[in-house]
Amino acid sequence: MKKLMNQPDQYVDQMLEGIVAAHPELKRIAGTQVIVRAHPKAKVALVSGGGSGHEPAHAGYVGVGMLDAAVSGSVFTSPTPDQVLSAIRAVDQGQGVLLVIKNYTGDVMNFEMAADLASMEGIAIEKVIVADDVAVENSTYTVGQRGIAGTVFVHKIAGAAAEAGMDLATVKRIAEKVIANVHSMGMALSPCTVPASGKPSFVLGEDEVEIGIGIHGEPGTHRENLRLADEIVDTLLDRILAHSGVVDGDEVAVMLNGLGATPQSELYIAYRRVAERLRARNIAVHKALVGEYMTSLEMAGFSISLLKLDDELMSLLDAPADTPAYRQS
Amino acid sequence: MKKLMNQPDQYVDQMLEGIVAAHPELKRIAGTQVIVRAHPKAKVALVSGGGSGHEPAHAGYVGVGMLDAAVSGSVFTSPTPDQVLSAIRAVDQGQGVLLVIKNYTGDVMNFEMAADLASMEGIAIEKVIVADDVAVENSTYTVGQRGIAGTVFVHKIAGAAAEAGMDLATVKRIAEKVIANVHSMGMALSPCTVPASGKPSFVLGEDEVEIGIGIHGEPGTHRENLRLADEIVDTLLDRILAHSGVVDGDEVAVMLNGLGATPQSELYIAYRRVAERLRARNIAVHKALVGEYMTSLEMAGFSISLLKLDDELMSLLDAPADTPAYRQS
């Protein structure tokens, strides 16, 4: 294992110290792995999180127009209910809290337990569960479809709704609309290594790639030999389009997400094919995000997320955001 | 070689197609590898560029408050003079053009040749050469110190000066002040592979890292066994501080730049140590940039850049920018 780190058991702690050192607009709740805005606002609060190792998800999305708190578990491990509860307590301004949960069994269980505890303390709390990965039904750690990079669109759009002063029920309704409208799928060219284990999470042959992989290296639909980027994009995009209900003439947002080690040049080569395919179908791209939005440590590979837009989602997607990993004015 | 690409000889072309497809605020000059703003502004123009494979540098910095054009050569290969000349002609608004060149022999030669040709056409043209890498004097491809990630601070600050309407001589003076004040150094945990060659550009042992490496894998100061992140940061930062003239009480900007395959979590672990060290020296960090700003394809590793600030540089660094890879309001 060749990693830029100190002691493996301090990996997450020191990462969080680095994040707040670099971004004074964020702060860490002492004694926790929770990152919140340094300058909170009176509004419905959004809390997300999950295992670490997916940076910039989720601490990179804490800030104006997106999240109010991000809870980081150990690498690829759900945060505990008490950590989530600390986040909820810290950000509740009396207008309620929406939990944005990726569909992994551990995350769902721990976030729901925290929600129950918060509810008993009188905090108005709602949750949504993101399950955008169309690759497989059920997988390691997950019952149903996994929640992956499409989650960032939930942060952005529900975050804009909350920032605009909408109430908890409305913010939840909008988050659920994003979830219904976003579909994703990924692939890996190489595995990654969890610091505490020291060994790659899976092994691929020299020319082998895994199609439909999850963001923790969970099995996908199949392995195959590496093909041209355009062919791989077509495989993912065909499946996404089939699940998405997107039809000719629709307007969409696209995320071409790098999993960690894939150069930006290659993400753009892949995006070029996505754009070409959508253009041929007369599907208009209102906004394209190309970069690392939800990673798997140093895994090479990418995912595509397609979000079908309507006027409400479009206007919230276009609203300003100011976070370490997502800025627009 | 396991890369997400189509034909290697279309690598740069298809990447550029992807960039303009994703970012409608940019456009490509037909028949060239030059990316310019779709909506130019009457002001002094900034042109930069170099070999491809360093994305988001430089096309990702084209936009409001930074560059007017980026010229991309083949991967790790200087663009030709005619490409640079196309960029100069495209962006000149009659107020002159500043070339921002990284100190590599090929870049310097080709950009200077283009400058001469543009000058003969009556275009007012000036150049600055960035040589921020304190690791080594002279190296593969370079006489003197190499130009690396500190170049992004030149784009940002000289770009803000041009955007504010300053004249060519002033923009050049400010760019030269940034160059005098910025010092960088990097290290690699793993090599990268140029698509056209198909083989890693160098080889490291299983526990071996290279200190002081260049952004094309040029040799650094030495190889050693992998140490703790804090120790590696100290090695780079000590050398940078020794060259920088930064003293206790100074105010700086810091870039902790990932070279391609290093997870953001590890960049923040490294930044944590930088912040700790600077705090101990009573050096105030006015702005920290942590992420991938100038990469070497899928090389694992990072560089640190330290920019000493004065009031003029600070106010230009804080000015708005709106480019694919650098946004602030």
Image: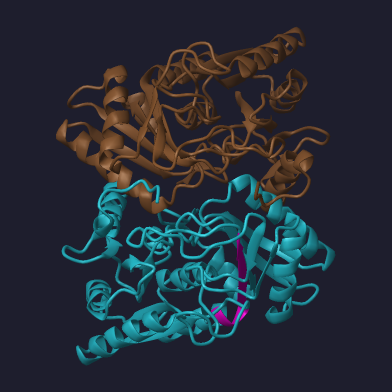
Chain colours: A brown, B cyan
* Residue B287 on the magenta span: no
* Residue drawn where x is 78% and y is 42% of the image: A10
- Range of residues picked out in magenta: B179-188
Relative height, residue A170 to residue B185 (above, below): above
Whether residue A186 can be seen here: yes
Residue A192: which quarter of the image?
A: top right
> Foreground: B108 or A70?
B108
Q: A160 left or right of A234? A: right
Q: Would you identify the image quadrant in which residue A213 lies?
A: top left
- Could one spot residue B38 in this view of the protein? no
Give the quadrant of residue B77: bottom left
- Where in the figure is residue A85, as x and y percent of width and height? 74, 20
Is most of the magenta stretch helix, strand or loop? strand
Q: How many marks?
A: 0
In the depicted view, which residue is nearer to us: B92 or B281? Answer: B281
Q: Is residue B188 above or below residue A194?
A: below
Task: Estimate the x, y position of residue B62 in percent, counting from the top left.
Answer: 37, 62
- Left or right for A134, reference B40: right
Q: Residue B45 placed where, x, y %?
A: 34, 74
For residue A21, side relative to residue B79 (left or right): right
Q: Is residue B183 magenta?
A: yes
Point 69% across, 55% down: residue: B270
Residue at 67% x, 62% y: name it: B286
Residue drawn at 56 percent across, 29 percent down? A216
- Pinpoint residue B73: horizontal percent, then vertical percent: 31, 69
- The vertical placement of A221 against A54, above or below, is above
